[in-house]
């Protein structure tokens, strides 16, 4: 862990103040005032003195390190143990001045060896957004939908000379996609950034993008009232006979709910617990429905189609939609504003923090219900 925390923080605060003075003058399109010029000069001198002090301290540390016994001489360097103990004490609320662990708003100063071991929690995300039909346009968009049924269809039949043909056609409807704005904001303390070699800004930026992807997938699967519909309006599918179990026949029936012409790009989407339940199902010939299949993206298939797991899907429970099947190109998604993530270095300077903000505007509705089907528990 880096030492001399107070000096480093003081230097960073001085630099931030200098930028505020210069940016203020540029914004107002004027020269620096006499007081501002004097303050900048003082800041310059203070920063130089701090850098010199830090340099001298580093030289002293180098001298001390040269005196450390070589590994294997019976004396073990316990720095890592001390840092771990100090960090544990901080978490438990025990003040430890020696370790220089200070509450910095959204986390303590993390010892280097701990920061380098940070492991993020992994969520399963399936490629629903990737497979959907995407429209990147501003404003609203109307997608025409043509439907035929037993009464409205293009009439083809035998004809007799000099007798008029009967005219008929299916019905045209439309799917209207608008846009709903969503965003996320995270703050990282500058103390936390300054006192660990772990690149926290990049880490949080990547986590922000990952969190947005999880959010979008959840909306595509479940929708939200008066917002994004996603798959929430899908009616094509079957209802299981039980509220707590799925049979092999029901899985087969669900697959057949999608027309053959749309089977080529079809896939299964379910939770990990549902997949575990399906592992034990067998067909009439005694063969397991879920098989290892190296040709599929995650090495598993049901009835020849790849299986994707999503933590956004509900587990088997009363009335829950637990499986989606089909070609997800039947789901339309529109982005009026592409996902963009920015680092705000100046906005939260007065809080001694850096902001990471993500904005996007999107909508999603079913475009072709024939391509998709769902299994709902009783």
Image (cartoon, grey):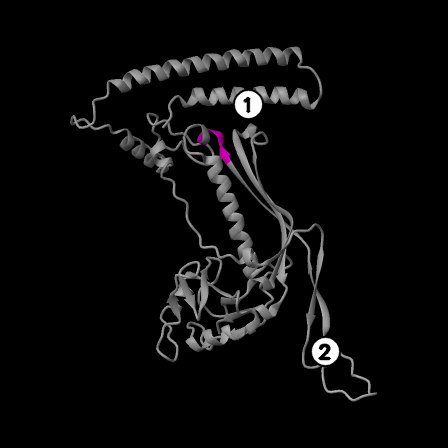
Chain-order first, disc 1 or disc 2: 1
**Disc number for residue 169:** none
Q: Image point 34% across, 29% down: which residue?
A: 96
Give 107 or 21, whichever is nearer the viewer: 21
Q: Is residue 107 within the magenta segment?
A: no
**How many numbered marks, from 0 up?**
2
Quarter placement of the N terminus: top left
Task: Bin the neighbour count of mark 1 within 10 Å (Cα to Cα): few under 14, some 14-19, many 20 and up.
Answer: some
Q: Looking at the rendering, which quadrant does residue 262 occupy? A: bottom right
* Majority secondary structure of magenta residues: helix
Q: Nearer the observer, disc 1 or disc 2?
A: 2
Q: Which residue is mark 2?
A: 154
Q: Image point 54% across, 52% down: which residue?
A: 215
Query: What segment carries the magenta color?
Result: 188-192
Label 1: which secondary element:
helix
Q: Position of residue 69 (x, y in %)?
A: 21, 22
* Residue farthest along the left direction in this orientation: 74
Q: Is residue 314 left or right of residue 129?
A: left
Q: Image point 46% across, 78% down: which residue?
A: 241
> Height in image: 358 above or below 8?
below
Q: Which residue is mark 1?
A: 16
Q: Position of residue 28 (x, y in %)?
A: 70, 22
Q: Is residue 190 within the magenta segment?
A: yes
Q: Image point 42% across, 72% down: which residue?
A: 244
């Amino acid at each position: 862990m880096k030492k001399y925390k107070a000096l480093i923080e003081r230097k960073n605060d001085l630099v931030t103040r200098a930028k505020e003075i210069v940016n203020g003058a540029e914004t107002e399109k004027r020269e620096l005032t006499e007081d501002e010029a004097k303050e900048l000069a003082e800041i310059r001198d203070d920063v130089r003195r701090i850098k010199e002090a830090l340099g001298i301290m580093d030289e002293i540390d180098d001298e001390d390190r040269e005196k450390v016994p070589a590994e294997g001489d019976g004396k073990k360097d316990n720095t890592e143990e001390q840092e771990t103990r100090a960090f544990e004490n901080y978490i438990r609320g025990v003040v430890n001045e020696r370790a220089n662990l200070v509450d910095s708003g959204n986390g303590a100063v993390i010892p280097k060896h701990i920061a380098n071991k940070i492991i993020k929690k992994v969520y399963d995300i399936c490629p629903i957004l990737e497979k959907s039909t995407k429209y990147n346009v501003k404003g609203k968009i109307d997608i025409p939908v043509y439907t035929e049924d037993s009464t409205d269809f293009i009439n083809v039949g035998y004809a007799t000379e000099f007798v008029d043909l009967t005219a008929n056609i299916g019905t045209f409807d439309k799917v209207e996609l608008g846009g709903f704005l969503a965003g996320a904001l995270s703050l990282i303390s500058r103390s936390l950034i300054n006192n660990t070699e772990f690149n926290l800004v990049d880490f949080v930026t990547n986590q922000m993008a990952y969190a947005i992807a999880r959010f979008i997938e959840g909306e595509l699967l479940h929708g939200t009232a008066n917002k994004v519909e996603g798959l929430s309006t899908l009616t094509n599918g079957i209802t299981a006979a039980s509220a707590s179990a799925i049979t092999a026949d029901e899985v087969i029936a669900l697959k057949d709910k999608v027309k053959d012409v749309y089977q080529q790009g079809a896939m299964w989407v379910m939770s990990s617990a549902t997949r575990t339940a399906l592992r034990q199902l067998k067909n009439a010939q005694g063969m397991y429905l879920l098989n290892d299949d190296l040709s599929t993206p995650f090495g598993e298939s049901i009835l020849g189609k790849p299986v994707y797991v999503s933590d956004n899907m509900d587990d088997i429970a009363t009335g829950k939609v637990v499986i989606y099947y089909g070609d997800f190109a039947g789901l339309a998604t529109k982005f009026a504003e592409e996902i963009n993530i920015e680092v705000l270095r100046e906005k939260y300077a007065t809080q001694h923090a850096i902001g990471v903000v993500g904005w996007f505007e999107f909508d999603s509705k079913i475009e072709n219900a024939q391509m998709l089907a769902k299994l709902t528990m009783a």
